Image (tube, helix red, strand yellow):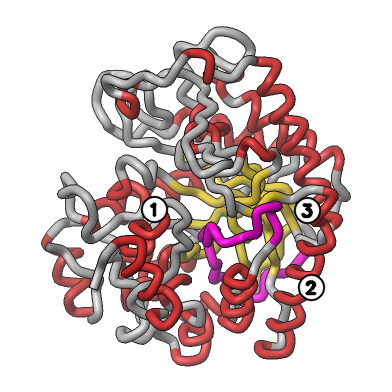
């Protein structure tokens, strides 16, 4: 079974053997350089990706574990913290403890943002930029703890012999209201002190699912213009409704890894081959609206996590080596950056690279193939990864995420609050044992 790289020699050997040809730089100092975006300065090129803890209060406020997680991120030194999925409608929550921003808890979010910035300034000498991810969970909505899906269309890849009732397919009128809620969520995020908002469009949640709604009728299906309507109109509404200094962005799926007509960013010849023509068109449209930063990702963590994580082990045997998946994401991101040099772009899917991750992303950034490096599961295991990279030039092999997927196992259990069972075992090993029966 493939394992995360704990030495450069191990990475370089497999990089050559698999012909993934990922670049590698001994000098990672570029990761410590500031980056200007929208009139603001991101202190360095390292990003904590949006990692949901499913540990808010019943009414959507940050709770004890939420605050603990962001305190660790704040002290960890990353220049940009992509704040986790935050629902903008009650029925849009992916679990009963998902964060849910609204007028009644706005002060709680204000205090959380202030705490992150104050802690980071005190510990690191600088404040990170913080972007809130505004979401509608769509197919994965579970606001009361049991599935209550709201889907763009029926998908036999996911539903197989148990299709979701057609009355759960959202109407165009409902999607109009979702767009309004996303814009309102952006406005609330600005009031709470966030530096920007992410109109989430990834990992098969509602906005992302619409990108592949080829066979849907109405204003939100069929043509590329229609399939991207919810994202485009909510982004434009947020740009127009928030101040010019507020950053409007998106964490954007550019490849789903499903055959046409159920996948976005894939060729229409029945293969799984990447086709970035439609994502490229969408990125150019978003730039016209004023978007200057995108967080690029691929795949679906519920169904084909080897595409978007990629993972080393889990509930099925992946059809490819994890390094092949890493290369697809990074090279696809680089291709989009080449087509859109004016757009600042964050990469994803680097946790499997282990100790080689800083050297690989530094090489890409030095070659202007993307601008910032996003670390996802790594931040659960190793919240101070950025501090080590910036001060020591490397990551500690004894702190890295080992891609064991135990955090995901917890998340899939009712009431699960995910975190790193291996590196943060005092808090999360008891949770894992209780919910998953693990040792």
Circle 2: element type: helix
Circle 3: element type: helix
Give the residue drawn at x 28%, y 23%.
Answer: 160
Q: Is the residue marked by circle 2 packed among few (<14), some (14-19), or many (20+) residues within 10 Å?
A: some
Pointers 2 and 3 in contact (C-beta within 8 Å): no
For the question of whether residue 280 can be seen, the reply is no
- Of badges 1 and 3, the one in the foreground is 1
Q: Which mark is residue 349?
A: none
* Image spot of residue 300 (x, y percent): 39, 42
The residue that mark 2 highlights is 114
The residue that mark 3 highlights is 189
Give the residue drawn at x 50%, y 77%.
Answer: 383
Examine the rendered structure and indicate whether residue 164 appears above or below residue 397: above
Q: Is residue 347 left or right of residue 395?
A: right
Using the image as rendered, state which of residue 105 and residue 232 is in the foreground: 105
Please check the rendered image and state whether residue 409 is part of the magenta-colored stretch, yes or no.
Answer: no
Circle 1: element type: loop
Q: Is residue 338 left or right of residue 102?
A: left
Examine the rendered structure and indicate whether residue 221 appears above or below residue 59: above
Using the image as rendered, state which of residue 402 and residue 24 is in the foreground: 402
Pointers 1 and 3 in contact (C-beta within 8 Å): no
Examine the rendered structure and indicate whether residue 213 appears above or below residue 334: above
The residue that mark 1 highlights is 413
């Amino acid at each position: 079974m493939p394992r995360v790289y704990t030495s450069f020699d191990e990475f370089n050997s497999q990089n050559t053997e698999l012909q993934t040809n990922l670049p590698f730089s001994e000098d990672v100092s570029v990761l410590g350089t500031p980056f200007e975006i929208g009139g603001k300065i991101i202190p360095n090129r390292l990003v904590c990706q949006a990692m949901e803890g499913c540990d808010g209060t019943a009414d959507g406020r940050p709770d004890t574990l939420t605050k603990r997680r962001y305190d660790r991120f704040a002290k960890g030194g990353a220049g940009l913290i992509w704040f986790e999925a935050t629902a903008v409608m009650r029925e849009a929550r992916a679990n009963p403890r998902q964060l849910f921003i609204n007028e009644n808890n706005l002060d709680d979010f204000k205090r959380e943002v202030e705490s992150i910035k104050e802690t980071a300034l005190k510990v690191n000498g600088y404040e990170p930029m913080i972007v809130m991810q505004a979401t509608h969970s769509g197919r994965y909505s579970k606001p009361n703890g049991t599935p209550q899906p709201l889907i763009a269309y029926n998908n036999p890849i996911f539903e197989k012999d148990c299709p979701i009732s057609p009355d759960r397919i959202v109407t165009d009128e409902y999607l109009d209201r979702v767009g309004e809620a996303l814009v309102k969520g952006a406005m609330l995020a600005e009031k709470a002190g966030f530096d920007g908002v992410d109109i989430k469009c990834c990992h098969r949640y509602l906005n992302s699912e619409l990108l592949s709604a080829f066979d849907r009728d109405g204003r939100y299906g069929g043509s590329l213009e229609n399939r991207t309507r919810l994202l485009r109109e909510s982004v434009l509404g947020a740009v127009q409704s928030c101040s010019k200094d507020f950053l409007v962005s998106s964490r954007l799926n550019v490849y789903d890894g499903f055959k046409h007509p159920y996948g976005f960013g894939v060729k229409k010849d029945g293969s799984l081959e990447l086709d970035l023509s439609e994502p490229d068109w969408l990125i150019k449209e978003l730039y016209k609206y004023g978007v200057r930063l995108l967080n690029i990702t691929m795949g679906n963590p519920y169904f084909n996590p080897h595409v978007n994580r990629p993972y080393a082990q889990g509930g099925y045997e992946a059809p490819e080596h994890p390094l092949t998946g890493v290369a697809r994401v990074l090279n696809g991101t680089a291709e989009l950056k080449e087509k859109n040099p004016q757009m600042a772009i964050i990469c994803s899917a680097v946790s499997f690279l282990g100790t080689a991750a800083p050297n690989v992303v530094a090489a890409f950034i030095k070659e202007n193939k993307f601008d910032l490096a996003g670390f996802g599961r790594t931040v659960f295991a190793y919240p101070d990864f950025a501090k080590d990279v910036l001060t020591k030039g490397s990551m500690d092999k004894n702190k890295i995420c080992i891609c064991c997927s135990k955090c995901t196992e917890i998340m899939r259990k009712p009431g699960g609050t995910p975190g790193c069972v291996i590196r943060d075992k005092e808090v999360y090993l008891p949770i894992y044992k209780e919910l998953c029966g693990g040792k």
